[in-house]
Image: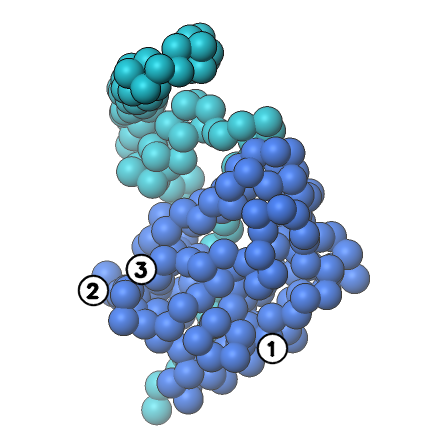
Amino acid sequence: MFNLSTGSIGNVGVVTSDNGGHTSEQITEMCVDKLIHVADSAPPAIREQARAFKNVVQGVVHAHINEAVKNDRLTVKVHLEKLGYSEIAKHIGEL
Amino acid sequence: MAITQAMCSSFKTELLTGTHNFTNSSGNTFKLALYTSSATINAATTAYTSSNEVSSSNYTAKGGALTNVTPSNGSGTVAFTSFSTLTFTNVTLTARGALIHNSSQSDKAVCALDFGGDKTATAGNFTITFPTNDASTAVIRIV
């Protein structure tokens, strides 16, 4: 005989945005939360070290996400310029 | 009327009858539907309901399809599974909770989720992120 004692449900997170997509900060946080989970029950010294490491990773990921956004916008801008939409390209570049 | 986070009781029975398959790619299609604070979804919910489901352009009734993560027990005693992040893009809506249901099995309910408060997106994105997929935090765990 076995005992299926219980089923548990974990807490989901909700991230929203207004008038456009998520900010790079929001994307960074979602990404880093997937990469690193620091349990509240971890021993204090380990927990603090893990949180410090998470902060470092967060900075690196954020910087690279910003670079990705800038590069993608530049690609779109140049593409639009080549198609003759210089005015729209200018607006994209100013975002 | 309230949203109470819970694994649906009918789902527990259906696990024992082999109704649900969470395997990635080859498993069933699960969807996540969003609800306003006026909805009543809880452990007693047995299937998707359109009652008090949110509405918005770019939001389809029954919600968005989830990407399954193949269940595992991580070499321990707890079986768990999760889903990839789900984003409803360019929506204007306010939701208080959600129901995960099995679209491949007559929309049978899996679990009710409580966001802890109203969450609003206005002409923006509404993203659901799932907790770390492990024995202690995964969204669905059989302990």
Residue at the (40%, 35%) spot, across then down:
A30
Are the residues under badges 3 and 1 in a single subunit?
A: yes
User: If you read the primary sequence from the N terminus, does the residue marked by circle 1 or circle 2 appear first?
Assistant: 1
Determine the chain carrying the residue at label 2: B
Label 1 sits on what residue type?
Answer: Thr
> Which one is closest to the eye, mark 1 or mark 2?
1
Location of mark 2 (residue): B75
Which element type, helix, strand or loop, lies under badge 2? loop
Q: Residues within 10 Å of mark 2 (few under 14, many from 20)?
A: few
Residue A81 position in % (x across, y down): 33, 13
> In the current view of this chain or complex, which residue is farthest to the front?
A84
- Which quadrant of the figure has residue B75? bottom left
Residue at the (53%, 74%) spot, across then down:
B107
Q: Residues within 10 Å of mark 3 (few under 14, many from 20)?
A: some
Determine the chain carrying the residue at label 1: B
Residue A83 position in % (x across, y down): 32, 19
Which residue is at the front of the view, B118 or B116? B118
Residue at the (51%, 68%) spot, across then down:
B101
Location of mark 3 (residue): B69
Q: Residues within 10 Å of mark 1 (few under 14, many from 20)?
A: some
Residue at the (47%, 72%) spot, across then down:
B102
| Chain letter corresponding to the colour cyan | A
Residue A45 as seen in the image, left or right of residue B97: left
Which residue is at the front of the view, B67 or B1? B67
Residue B42 position in % (x across, y down): 65, 67
| Residue A42 visible, this angle | no
User: If you read the primary sequence from the N terminus, does the residue marked by circle 2 or circle 3 appear first?
Assistant: 3
